[in-house]
Image (cartoon, grey):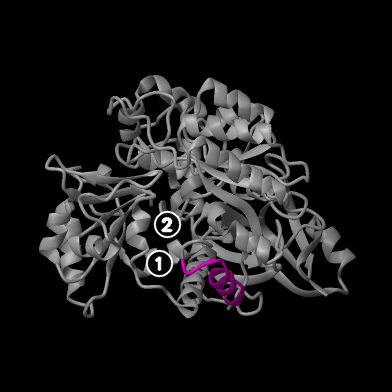
Amino acid sequence: MGDLWFGGNIYTMENDGDAVEAIYTEGKRIRAVGTYEKLYHEFYNQIEETINLQGKTLLPGFIDSHLHIIGHGEKILRLDLSQMKSPNEVKEALQNRTANLSEGEWLVGEGWNENQWDDPTIIHKSELDQITSTHPIMLTRVCRHAVLANSKAMELSGINDQTLNPQGGIIVHDEKGETTGYLLDTAQELIKDAMPKVSQEYLEQIIKISVDDLLSKGIVGGHTEDLNYYGGFSKTYQAFQHAINGKDKKFKAHLLVHHEVMDDLINEKLGYLDGSEYVEMGAVKIFADGALGGRTAWLTEDYHDDAGNRGVAIHNDETLEELVKKAREHNLPIAVHAIGDRAVQEIAQLIRKYPLNNGARDRIIHGQILNENSLNLLKELPVVVDIQPSFLASDLPWAIERLGNERMHLSYAWKTMLDNGVHCAGGSDAPIEDVSPLLGIQAAVLRKSFFDNNTYMPDEKLSLYEAVSLYTKGSAYAITQESNRGVLTEGYQADFTILEEDIFQTEPERLHEVEVSMTVIDGEIVYEKNSYHG
């Protein structure tokens, strides 16, 4: 027995403009697509339910190719600083939150971004000390490559003015040689390691909260990186398995494996795509560099606004190569955070030196800044670039100050990559950016800044079909699931995103306003706008 879906705009996404009148699903799969009349008559005796879309639009289910599911859930629960426009607004929010803290409790905030403040001066720890000297404070920057901490948090972390920078990190000092409370990249782990450990029950709750929100955004699956931050591989993996069990919660979670827990993966005798139907193992996650906002993305030339600084290499050359070799010894693909052109270039050369021969695909996460050499390397390699279109909307115009105009022609260069045969997948990097795929799709199509509404590098605009493909076909291809997910055709998984409007007929400026009507996984409605199905 099965279900017949009809009465709306059904885009298969196999090719631009491909559409059908109806889909017949049996169990978790699409049995057939075609005209309503043909499917109704062919499966008349097997149709258990007919779902009239009433003019809505049905697409293959959106898949976020790069996010942090637990971090997204924590952002929902924690103090959200991402929309604040000044340091005073941030400090006022912190002051208000301290009234509700128990003795010794950490005050944790998420998402501050000095580039959208009236005064972009980084808050000093002394200012945080004025808010509270008894509660440790940790405020994560929007890029998640930097934190602010007060003196109490620094004390608990064992950081003082003489503490040396760790490899791949910076403990910022002021002109007097005193720590400012601003810690970049690996240095922020010194603060995080001092925080109280979370329970598995907490993790399960956070995952469920996060997944519920993702489902409401039309997202049926996500490639997430969480396994190294919440008490270890085993606890976090079990929390995912319990929270997304396929019974009372369905979601297709693909877990990247941070290199520091690669041994745990191996000891558990797990390999690529092992796990369950809803929680599976992914590539080995490696960080090659930092972020553009904090000037720690690794560049081949100096920052335009910081002479002598070319960013941060998270690992030295030998260590980075050893990590790639170790993954290859266990037939594992790699997914490497690389924002700067030097980082992209270095990791592309290692992928070429140590090719993967088992059909899995390596990934470069972000790939924001390229040069001619790195682009040529990407063209030659069977590698997928995980892009985050919303980054352009939130990074420009200040990114031009970091890079200078000359480097911008190969920055955020998505159309160039696609036209050169480089496979791309679309994601949000939530909680860094808003998780909505429609916002990402809009950013890819318009290339407009959130700050000034100007259009940047218009030649790099994607068509709406190309942009939607990033979050459907592209994300499926990245994990070698292009024969199961990402398009609507016979035999593929019955995972759908159903929208209130036909986005192929909607003005691009309005894409972010389009509402999700339903989210469907395995042919089952798991989210509905006006009610919720477990």
Give the magenta-colored segment's residue range. Answer: 230-242
Q: Which of 219 and 309 is in front in this view?
A: 309
In the picture, residue 118 is in which quadrant? top left
Name the residue type under label 1.
Glu
Q: Quadrant of residue 132?
A: bottom left
Q: Position of residue 140 (x, y in %)?
A: 32, 56
Where does label 2 land, which residue? 431
- Mark 1 lies on residue: 74
Type of the residue with mark 2: Pro
Q: Is residue 352 visible?
A: yes
Tell me which residue sits at (17%, 56%) in the image.
89
Is residue 273 positioned above or below 49 on the image?
Answer: above
Dot 2 and dot 1 residues touching (CB under 8 Å) = yes
Please name the residue shown 63% across and 40% down the image.
384
Give the quarter of the figure containing the C terminus.
bottom right
- Where in the figure is residue 392, as x and y percent of width and height? 42, 38
